[in-house]
Amino acid sequence: MSTDFLPINGTDYIELYVGNAKQASLYYQHCFGFTLAAYAGPETGERNRVSYVLQQGKIRLVLTTSLQPDSPIAAHVHKHGDGVKVLALWVNDATQAFHETTSRGAEGAWSPQKAADEFGHVVTSAIKTYGDTLHVFVERKNYRGIFLPGYRAATSTFVASPVGLKHIDHCVGNVELGQMNRWVNFYETVMGFQLLVTFDDKDISTEYSALMSKVVSNGNGYIKFPINEPAAGKKKSQIEEYLEFHRGAGVQHIAIATDDIVSTVAQLRKNGVEFLHVPETYYDTVMERVGTIQEDLLELKRLNILIDRDEEGYLLQIFTKPVQDRPTLFFEIIERNGAKSFGKGNFKALFESIEREQEARGNL
């Protein structure tokens, strides 16, 4: 058995570059139940940006805005809109992670660097992946501070109510036509991931559009990255719409796990989160496909939660509408009851739902 040359403990944080971090922070606190944990900005000696760190369960979201009009952060927001810049990975040795990946062909974004304060030190390094997205390796075994050096603990006057979000389940990337296999090969060769599952245009298609997807996973299965590309269809696919409005490849959605999706989604809806809608006819035959489940089907139908099953169990899932004005980044809420898959049985219903949204935007 080959050794894992890039051991990863989990997702450390996900950083979004946004136009207004102060307002975005309040959105994620109110709507998604995140708690403000840390802050960096002029008050902490950071002159060029502000960053808010939000937490819930094991999830850290970092929202960053430039204070300068000509910075790389501002350029990223100008080009892509609000969206994911960093998928940070928690490792035991950020220096080794950098050398292992760059020696296998990764392009470095920055070499290992140490940052310290009164709480200890953190080592980070970073490599480039699809689009303008980065993987930052974070080594924090010698640090006991709230987040990273340069940040201070922070609280909000808004009292957030957690909705049961636990951890990142997977993060999906959209890449240009013909680029999916290139990036799958990148994760296999550069990062030692394995190909977990493949979906072709027969699996994910409607009358009008289609996509192809491959899922890669690291050695312990903590990190899963589906990679999508468009496939030929009569009309513009959701991937093509994303690439057009994002101006290139990037993170399409973040899937977050919950142990009680009924409670979580009920609260998210109450908080104002908008979800894609599948027709009620979906529920007429779904039980014939998935068999026995513990949840009340009427509750799932009321909340429009989808159901699927694989050889190891079943899962429940639902997808938000885009969380910014451009039809780009969205979230998935998922509850796994043994299932290791990604809801293949729901692809057609979801795709048709997304197409209805595309048509309303004039982008189908």
Image: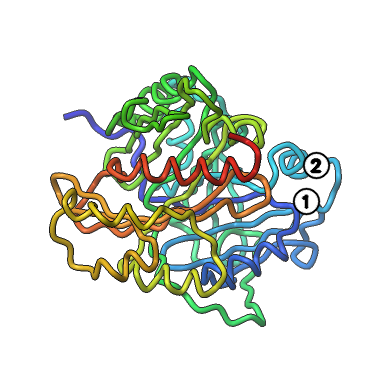
- Inspect this view and state whether residue 231 appears: yes
Height in image: 141 above or below 236? below
Task: Tell me which residue sits at (44%, 36%) in the image.
Answer: 97
Residue that sits furthest to the right in the current view: 69
Which quadrant of the figure contains the N terminus? top left
Height in image: 1 above or below 278? above
Type of amino acid under label 2: Ser
Q: Tell me the tag on residue 66.
A: 1
Type of amino acid under label 1: Ser
Which sits in the foreground, 278 or 324?
278
Height in image: 19 above or below 198? below
Height in image: 171 above or below 239? below
Which residue carries the number 2 mark?
A: 71
Q: Position of residue 154 (x, y in %)?
A: 64, 74
Find out whether the residues at labels 1 and 2 contact each other: C-beta distance under 8 Å: yes
Task: Tell me which residue sits at (51%, 66%) in the image.
Answer: 55
Which quadrant of the figure contains the C terminus? top right
Q: Position of residue 335 (x, y in %)?
A: 31, 59
